[in-house]
Structures are given as structure tokens and as C-alpha cells.
Amino acid sequence: MPATSNIYPTKQLQERDAAHHIHPFTDTGALNREGSRIITGAEGVWLTDSDGNRYLDGMAGLWCTQVGHGRKEIADAVYDQMRQLDYYNTFFKTSHPPAVELADKLAQLTPPQFNRVFYTGSGSEANDTVFRMVRTYWDLMGEPKRKHIIGRWNGYHGSTLAGTSLGGMTAMHAQGDLPIPGVHHIAQPYWFGEGGDMSQEEFGLLTARELERAIEEIGPENVAAFIAEPIQGAGGVIIPPETYWPEISRIVKKFGILLVVDEVICGFGRLGTWFGSDYYGIEPDLMPIAKGLSSGYLPIGGVMVADKVANAFIEKGGEFFHGYTYSGHPACCAAALANLKIMEEEKLVERVAEDIGPYLQKSWKELGDHPLVGEARMVGLVGALELVPVKGDRSKAFTPVGDVGTLCRDISFNNGLVMRAVRDSMIISPPLVISHEEADMLVERATKTLDQTFDRLKRDGRL
Ligand code: PMP
């Protein structure tokens, strides 16, 4: 594997990157001054950069590489598919074997109400599809006033216009004058940050009942759907209190609105179940998927469509004027099929539920004892550490928000561990194949990182 600086001269690549590449979610000016980190290879849970440094990929890329990096089986499946049929579309009354096979497989793996998938190239495209599908569904059902969609503050549903609108990231809304009209947001079930003196259970009910309040305010006859992630990922791995989802389910049923559960992160084994909906016992009508579907080897996403919604489109007829050039791309479907085969053969979902999940959770949660950590939480293989200035006092946060998280993330990189910072919390979501030994290394490096961050803050008089 090419990984050394003489094959990829770092400085030269950084200069060309700065000259020609605008990065996503990046202050490009600042990055260009600093120079980007150039990743040249990956194997299992390990990344290699252009200077030969190795990092434990604690984020599975961007929450996606379930089966780990460098799987030959997926590369071979894609190669074979490209030699057989490189590309053809799924418009104009055509299909092809990998699209059919993957759709069938997804119908088997997803909860029973799902028998059909609409393919997309990404999670954002999936949520744009959701947006149009939900509104069109209510038109077909003869209730065209039902156009309003409710999401949550600090939810994340992608970066396209509909995805950004449905999500509740205010900094994103501010760029591009969003959200789109007809989208509303309610409070998130973020007990650690916003729960005040309430118990987790009380807070879960309170935030769920915000949905009821919003529906009544907008007028139940105008509300089309509610969208949420089972556990908010990009918002900071926000694990809702146990009371939250049952109450949401009750409210959604009471008003007969569609429930959209965004499984882009929680899907495909992340929580130790195939889907987050299985973990929480939720019954969605639409389920956006992406990331773990192909372990990120090639871009593919989709919307799982429950029979109730699909039948409206099928029985009431008419064309759905929506689709993408790469909807059901043959090579991407082949990558997804090979990925799902590995997941099943290696029993990765069971492994997360019964073996590596509990194993890593135990030592991760012990990090909650560190003087810099206010809470250490984890479900399946997705977790967070809340960094706090005053241990035991949830009302105190670092100011300005985000500085300490960024510092800790940079220290973590220097210690050979990729953790992501969201505000001042540190996030992990490692590949589902991570071994016990690698899980121990992850926690060792995280501990060292916390110690060094703590010392640095003390030295700077911030603690
Ligand atoms: N939904 C959720 C829950 C996500 O986490 C993401 C990506 N982080 C998306 C949608 C958007 O997916 P993509 O980046 O593939 O467009």
C-alpha cells in the first residue's frame, strides 16, 4: 500500500489541495493556511497519512465504514459489476440485477412494513426524496393541506436544501436563507445539555410533547410528517431518554401524521440492531438510509417506503417526477450487496449487541470518571464524552463553545486516534469490526488525550 512521503510528497499535495479544492464543512481560508492532512491508505480500523502516520479510525470515516477499510470482497464485487454492466439508469422502464437484488435484500432486512426502496446517491438526497414524497403522498390521499413537516433543533438530515431545512442546525440555516417554508422545529431530547433539574424520564416526556404542541399550533389538518434520527449523530450523539420514543409514537399515531426515521447513521448495525427503529421499537413510514449500506465504499442511499405510502403511489397512479442519474447505480448496488453479505456472514450486528458493543461501552463509560468529563455515554458502537469545566455541574459549559472540543480533537489526532468534536463533546463511532485489542487502544488513546487536554487547560488557566 502506498503510504510514504516519497510516493506522496505531503507539502506538494497540500499546496495543490489549497489551490484547487474547496472542502465541505470547512473554513477553507484557515485550512489552506494550515494545510490539509492527506490520507493515503486504510486497512481495517487503521488510516495511514502521507507522512506514514497511523490513526485508529474512531469515526469509521463519517460514521459509515461498518465492515472496516480495505475489504477485498467489496472491491472485487465492484470490479466484476463494472466489467459486466458499468452503468445504466433505472428510469424509462428499466432495471438491472444488482438494483433488484439489493431492493429485495433491503426488504428482508428492514422492519416488516417496508417492502420497497427508492434509491438515491446519499443521505441528503434521501431526505430530499422524503420531502417530496411526503407532500405528494398527502396530495394523493386527498389532503393537500398537509404540507408542514416538523423536525428538531440540532437534528441533522443532510446538506441539500431540503436536508438542511429538515435538520435543525441554525448555522446551516443562516447560509442560504433556510429553512424552506413549511418546515418547523421542536426541542431535542438533549438531557445533559438542556434537561435542567428534571429527571431524564420527565425531560424525555416534555420534549416529546413539544411535538403535540407544535401539531396543535400548526393545525393537525396541516401537518404531514415528523422527522427525527433515533439517536442524533452529528448533533452530538444525543441518546434520548427511555420515555422519548414511546411518547413520540403515541403522538404520531394520535394525529395520523407520517413518521420519518432517519437511519443514515443508526442503520446497519450501529446500535447492535439492524436499524435504530428496531432498537427503540419505532414504526416509521419512511426510512432514509445511506452510509453503512455500502460501508461508504461507493456512494449510495435510499428511502425505505412502507407499504402504506408505497401503495398510495402505486394504486392511485401517476408519475412521481423525481429521481437521480445514479439512483440504483449498478456498481454502488454491488458494493452494498457485498457489504451486507460480509455483515451477515461475520454476524456484525450480533457482535455489536453481544460482544464488542458491551466490551467497549464498559471502558468508555469509565471515562466518565475523568475530571474533564461530565458524562460518557454509548449505545451499540456510537458514543460521546461531554467535556465540562466544572465536574458535576451540568449548568456550566466552556466559553466560547467549541474551542475545547477542537483542542481535544487535535490532541487526539496527535495521539493517533480520530475522534470528532461536536461543540465540546468528543464523539466516536468506530467500524463494527474493531477488535477487543483495538478497542483497548482506542480507550487508552482517548484517556491520554483527555489527560493532555486537561493539563493544557489547567496551564492556560481555563480550569
Ligand atoms: N441524515 C443523517 C442522520 C446524517 O447523519 C447524514 C450525514 N451525516 C445525512 C442524513 C446526510 O447524508 P449525506 O452526507 O450522505 O448526504
Image (cartoon, rainbow, N blue to C red):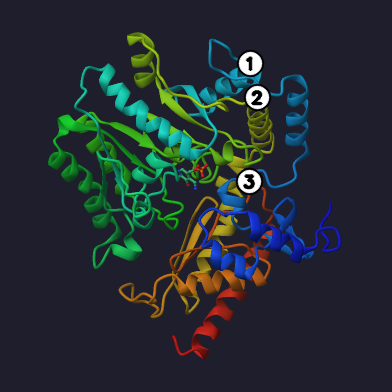
Per the model, the C-alpha gap separating discs 3 and 2 is 20 Å
| Horizontal side, residue 52 vs residue 449: left or right | right
Residue position marked by numbered label 3 in the rendering: 65
| Horizontal side, residue 180 vs residue 278: left or right | left
Callout 2: SS: helix
Depth check, mark 3 against mark 2: the one in front is: 2
Residue occupying image coordinates x 29% and y 63%: 194
Depth check, mark 3 against mark 1: the one in front is: 1
Neighbor class of circle 1 (other Cα within 10 Å; few <14, some 14-19, many 20+) is some
For the residues bearing labels 1 and 2, Cβ distance under 8 angstroms = yes
Residue occupying image coordinates x 69% and y 35%: 342
Q: Position of residue 233 (x, y in %)?
A: 46, 52
Residue position marked by numbered label 2 in the rendering: 330
Residue occupying image coordinates x 55% and y 61%: 28
Q: Position of residue 370 (x, y in %)?
A: 50, 76
Neighbor class of circle 2 (other Cα within 10 Å; few <14, some 14-19, many 20+) is many
Residue 415: mark in rendering: none
Residue position marked by numbered label 1 in the rendering: 96
Residue furthest out toward the right: 6
For the residues bearing labels 3 and 1, Cβ distance under 8 angstroms = no
Per the model, the C-alpha gap separating discs 3 and 1 is 26 Å
Q: Is residue 191 above or below residue 369?
A: above
For the residues bearing labels 3 and 2, Cβ distance under 8 angstroms = no
Residue occupying image coordinates x 61% and y 70%: 33
Q: Is residue 341 above or below residue 248?
A: above
Circle nearer the N terminus (1, 2) = 1
> Which of the two residues, 332 or 304, is positioned nearer the viewer here?
332
Q: Is residue 86 above or below residue 5?
A: above
